[in-house]
């Protein structure tokens, strides 16, 4: 009876058992051994997460506990191929070159805003397929610059544009089935400046000829046809005269676009920018949706890329006459509360390409609306299946300015994050 008298109460025994199990789990995670965690599961570093995920949090939403967060897009044409280019939706980065901690000119303190956190090469490897680049005449060359009044200054300059275009050329060479779109905010006035620039970068061999671009609301060639013809680079300029002078497509002849900046994130409203025809006009077969505030705030972007993004996609979809965007342009594209822009784009592609709730449920060669049973997104469903990115490990190269995720190992906090929903009208 001695043992019975000294036995602790059952609840205390269970508590101690659970506590010891948690301490063991926390210790393992702190040593980077809780690998292959899935989307939304707790983590302490990116090595804890499965392929295509990284370890991040979203203090702007009050969610400080790090979780495995999406960092890799599903390339829709790797699942459903052979459709016209304008049937797909792609992630586009706003001011793709304006990267936190990018080196400034020697002896100059840069004074401007930043919009992204990793290199253009890394953006492309993570599934971004659209780049917004601001180009200026500067230092007897063409530079990428985040400036004002149509002039580049030493304190707003980033680097010669050819450097970034060399990254694009390398990616297209290494990935022969991929297509990239570049939209230029154009302040270049040197004669044939852009033509010479793209030729110097070796991108002329991938150029989609403006003469073959469809007018009005006609379909574009299929992805397969564009790849076979090697028309894998679409370039648009904001200067109308360059279409005739240099053979560079004037952007608003071929796409409609909503207002950029704060109007583009104002819930319940989605009006066209002044250069564009109305979104519902059916005057072009491409639709660019801007979704970024006028003044980018790195820490707030995870909040912006949660439920508000899905709501704005719904609003613009309806205002465009039930037309889905082909590009959705964002700042700090990696940041979210879990799935972010990657999940929203998956849902749009699923809806458009196969009539399913997400591209992960699509199947090639079956009737429209025949979907795989996808209950919860998994790392395997989010991994690019085209074979181009097999080296991706889930580690995301944020700059030092990005807040590192920290997971305390003395407390267990469980959160439930409802999936971002895109409520498209059928």
Image (cartoon, rainbow, N blue to C red):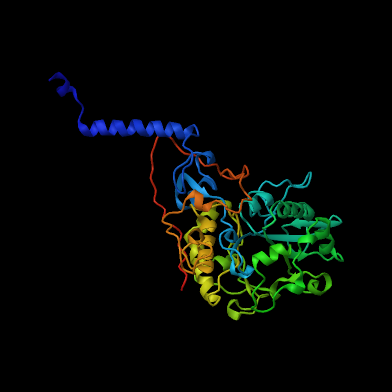
Given residues 210 and 195, the one toward you in this image is 210
The relative height of residue 119 versus residue 276 in the rendered view (above or below) is above
User: Which image quadrant for residue 404?
Assistant: top right
Is residue 239 in view from this perspective?
no
Given residues 386 and 86, the one toward you in this image is 386
The relative height of residue 115 versus residue 325 in the rendered view (above or below) is above
Q: Looking at the figure, which quarter contains the N terminus?
A: top left
User: Which image quadrant for residue 257?
Assistant: bottom right
In this rendering, position of residue 129 left or right of residue 381: right
User: How many numbered dots are placed on residues in this image?
Assistant: 0
Residue at point 50%, 54% (across, down) = 339
Q: Residue furthest left?
A: 1
- Residue 387, given in percent of the width and then of the height, sits at 61, 50
- Residue 210, given in percent of the width and then of the height, sits at 76, 71
In this rendering, position of residue 31 left or right of residue 236: left
User: Which image quadrant for residue 222?
Assistant: bottom right
Q: Residue furthest front?
A: 365
Residue at point 86%, 64% (across, down) = 190
Residue at point 53%, 41% (across, down) = 46
Is residue 196 in view from this perspective?
yes
């Amino acid at each position: 009876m001695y043992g019975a008298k000294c036995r602790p109460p059952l609840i205390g025994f269970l508590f101690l058992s659970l506590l010891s199990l948690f301490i063991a789990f926390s210790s393992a995670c702190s040593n980077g051994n809780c690998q292959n965690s899935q989307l939304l599961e707790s983590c302490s570093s990116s090595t804890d997460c499965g392929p295509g995920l990284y370890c991040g949090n979203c203090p702007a939403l009050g969610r400080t506990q790090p979780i495995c967060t999406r960092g890799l897009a599903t390339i829709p044409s790797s699942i459903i191929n052979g459709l016209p280019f304008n049937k797909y939706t792609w992630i586009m980065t706003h001011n793709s070159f304006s990267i936190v901690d990018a080196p400034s000119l020697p002896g100059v303190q840069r004074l401007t805003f930043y919009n992204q956190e990793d290199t253009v090469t890394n953006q492309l490897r993570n599934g971004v397929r659209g780049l917004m680049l601001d180009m200026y005449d500067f230092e007897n060359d063409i530079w990428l610059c985040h400036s004002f009044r149509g002039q580049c200054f030493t304190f707003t300059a980033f680097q010669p544009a050819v450097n970034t275009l060399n990254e694009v050329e390398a990616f297209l060479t290494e990935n022969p089935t991929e297509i990239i779109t570049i939209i230029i905010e154009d302040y270049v006035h040197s004669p044939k400046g852009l033509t010479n620039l793209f030729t110097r970068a070796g991108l002329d061999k991938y150029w989609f000829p403006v003469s073959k671009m469809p007018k009005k609301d006609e379909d574009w060639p299929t992805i397969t046809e564009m790849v076979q013809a090697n028309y894998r680079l679409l370039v648009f300029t904001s200067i109308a005269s360059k279409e005739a002078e240099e053979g560079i497509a004037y952007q608003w002849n071929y796409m409609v676009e909503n207002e950029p900046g704060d109007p583009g994130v104002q819930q319940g409203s989605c009006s066209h920018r002044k250069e564009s025809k109305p979104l519902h006009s059916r005057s072009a077969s491409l639709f660019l949706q801007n979704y970024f505030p006028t003044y980018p705030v790195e820490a707030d972007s995870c909040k912006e890329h949660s439920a508000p993004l899905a709501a704005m996609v719904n609003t613009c979809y309806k205002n465009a006459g039930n037309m889905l965007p082909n590009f959705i342009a964002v700042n700090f594209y990696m940041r979210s509360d879990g799935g972010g822009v990657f999940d929203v784009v998956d849902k749009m592609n699923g809806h458009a390409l196969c009539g399913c709730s997400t591209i992960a449920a699509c199947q090639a060669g079956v009737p429209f609306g025949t979907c795989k049973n996808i209950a919860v997104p998994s790392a395997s469903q989010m991994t690019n299946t085209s074979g181009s990115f097999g080296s991706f490990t889930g580690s995301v190269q944020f700059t030092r300015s990005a807040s590192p995720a920290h997971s305390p190992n003395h407390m267990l906090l469980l959160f439930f994050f409802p999936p971002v929903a895109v409520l498209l009208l059928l």
